[in-house]
Image (cartoon, rainbow, N blue to C red):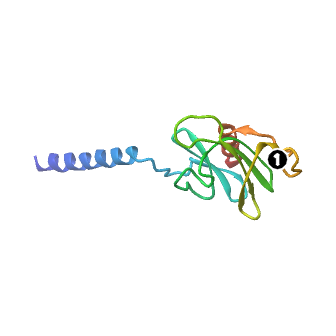
Amino acid sequence: MRRFGVITLATGATLILALCLAACDVDLFGNDRQPLVGPYGVFVGEGKYYLVLDRFQAGCGLLGDAIHQIGWNERVILVQLEPCVGDGPPSGWRVVNVQAKTIETISEGLIKPRPDLTDLKLVPAAEAWSRGRSRRK
């Protein structure tokens, strides 16, 4: 009879541990962040995509908002933002200089005249995240 109590206790502890791990939003295997260029990556959480360095940054990633669409090369990343919380229309543009690690706000009208941005192909955030997954394999 005593052995049954030990097995029940171990089983109960295992179930509690499994529930705790399943309940928390912890990326144990590093699958939520996918590489993009340089030290930058795309992080997915709560159905939105964020530009991050080596991990998720609180407050909606590096840019303070979610990615609507994104284009990049080895030198720059161009991001059209969308609200981090709730739904809404795209809310502005950011340019990230990959080497200098600087972020600049830019208006849509200034994108085409800039030679470092004209050849970038913008893709939806989910596609950028998927491309990162395919580079990891």
Report which quarter residue 128 is drawn in: top right
Please state the horizontal and vertical placement of residue 22, each as a whole percent of the image: 39, 44
Residue at image point 66% right, 52% down: 41
Residue at image point 88% right, 47% down: 113
Q: Nearer the viewer, residue 46 or 81?
A: 81
Q: Secondary structure at mark 1?
A: helix
Direction from residue 21 to residue 127 in the image, left or right: right
Q: Nearer the viewer, residue 82 or 47?
A: 82
Question: Which amino acid, by three-letter code, is at mark 1?
Answer: Leu
Please state the horizontal and vertical placement of residue 46, each as a whole percent of the image: 51, 41
Please state the horizontal and vertical placement of residue 83, each as a whole percent of the image: 58, 41
Report which quarter residue 47 is drawn in: top right
Residue at image point 49% right, 52% down: 28
Q: Nearer the viewer, residue 35 or 125?
A: 125
Residue extending farthest bottom: 100
Residue extending farthest left: 1
Q: Nearer the viewer, residue 104 or 70?
A: 104
Query: How many marks do you count on the picture?
Result: 1
Residue at image point 40% right, 47% down: 24
How crowded is the residue under tag 1: few (<14 C-alpha within 10 Å), some, or many (20+)? Answer: few
Direction from residue 4 to residue 77 in the image, left or right: right
Please state the horizontal and vertical placement of residue 31, each as a whole percent of the image: 57, 47
Q: Which residue is mark 1?
A: 110
